[in-house]
Image (cartoon, grey):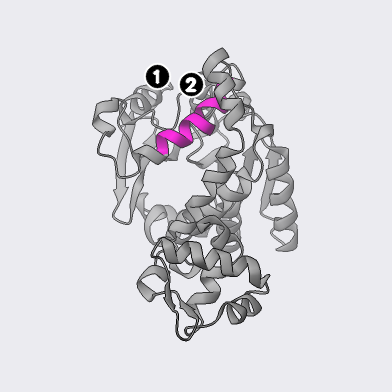
Amino acid sequence: MISIGHRAGIFDTMAALPPSTSHQIAASAKLNERYVREWLGCLLAAKLIVHDPEKNTWHLPAEHAALLTRAAAPNNFAAFTQYISVLGSVEDKILHCFREGGGVPYSQFTRFHEVMADESGQTVVPALFDHILPLVPGLMEKFEAGISVLDLGCGRGIALRTLAARYPKSRFTGIDFSAEAIGWATEQAAKENLPNLRYETGDAAQLSHKHAFDFITTFDAIHDQARPDLVLHAIARALKPDGTYLMQDIRASSRPHENADHPAGVLLYAISTFHCMTVSLAQGGMGLGTMWGRQLAEKMLNDAGFRSIRVEQLAHDFQNEYYIIRHAA
């Protein structure tokens, strides 16, 4: 129901209204009143909204709006609840995998790239210029002067579009396995008239570029690859000798007992089982899973030829770690 409230815009509507009737809320949100009224009853039972039975009005408290509206990004918890229905749609197939092994391929997941883009739009993109890019000293000045940038596993490419619009002298390439995601990204880039940006459909493990990019990024994209080892080797080849690779991935340990108190551990292991691990196994891959952890990540980066690895955390982001990686120390 929180996911419905996010997708239908009810939280955003209520945050902008004084205490209102269900008819007023439905009219403002352009929704069916009967469904809105039932939704309000649910959210009242969950103690997320307030109801005045005498006036028959409903109100979203400001302290709850601060965690449930698009204006609250990156603190909008409601966006994450979309994963429940997306992942639940493949429950029968995951149960089959428990019994028979194998995996569930990307093609079986509806809306996954849309939900990932929604999450990226409220977590990665708002933090790019103030938090993420400054992790690499001098990087923003290089963007201004003009460099070649690759985002591998770019999905719908929201971060790249933001960068391409900001830095017209730099050249940006996005590559993703999903033709649907790349088609959507290409269409949006054309609408925004970004000649310095292009998208390609491709397998990250078969990346053939050599010493072609000054800066390469992956945002939560390595752990669900079929062959992340080959992908990291391909990145090492594609990066210029003096270039930098920025890998954002889940903040976790490779030792499960050290994740017992992780604030999002339950959710992340569930996402791993229902998506990240299974899509890798569906391709005959390694099935690292979401919680592969820093220890294994650093080992695989070393095996790929990287020797200078610095791991940073951002105060506002408890879920991810940022690996700043170069060929040599």
Q: Earlier in the sequence, mark 2 or mark 1?
A: 2
Relative image position of residue 278 (x, y in whole percent): 54, 26
Question: Dot 1: few (<14), some (14–19), or many (≥20) neighbours within 10 Å?
Answer: few
Relative image position of residue 313 (x, y in whole percent): 30, 47
Relative image position of residue 201 (x, y in whole percent): 70, 36
The residue under the point 44% across, 61% down is 76
Magenta-colored stretch includes residue 222: no
Q: Magenta residues, as a range?
A: 268-281
Asked if residue 189 shows in the view, the reply is yes
Q: Is residue 70 above or below residue 180?
A: below
Residue of label 2:
229
Q: Based on the displayed image, in which of its 4 quarters is residue 189 positioned?
A: bottom right
The answer for how far apart the CA atoms under marks 2 and 1 are is 8 Å
Q: Mark 2 touching mark 1, by CB under 8 A?
A: yes
- Helix or strand or loop: what does disc 2 sit on? helix
Q: Amino acid at mark 2?
A: Asp
Mark number displayed over residue 17: none
| 272 left or right, relative to 329 | right
**Can you say which quadrant of the picture contains the C terminus?**
top left
Relative image position of residue 229 (x, y in whole percent): 48, 21
Q: Based on the displayed image, in which of its 4 quarters is residue 251 positioned?
A: top left
Magenta-colored stretch includes residue 275: yes
Residue of label 1:
303
Residue depth check, mark 2 versus mark 1: number of the one nearer the observer: 2
Question: Dot 2: few (<14), some (14–19), or many (≥20) neighbours within 10 Å?
Answer: some
The residue under the point 37% across, 38% down is 266
Residue 57 or residue 9, whichever sits in front: 57
Q: Is residue 207 above or below residue 187?
A: above
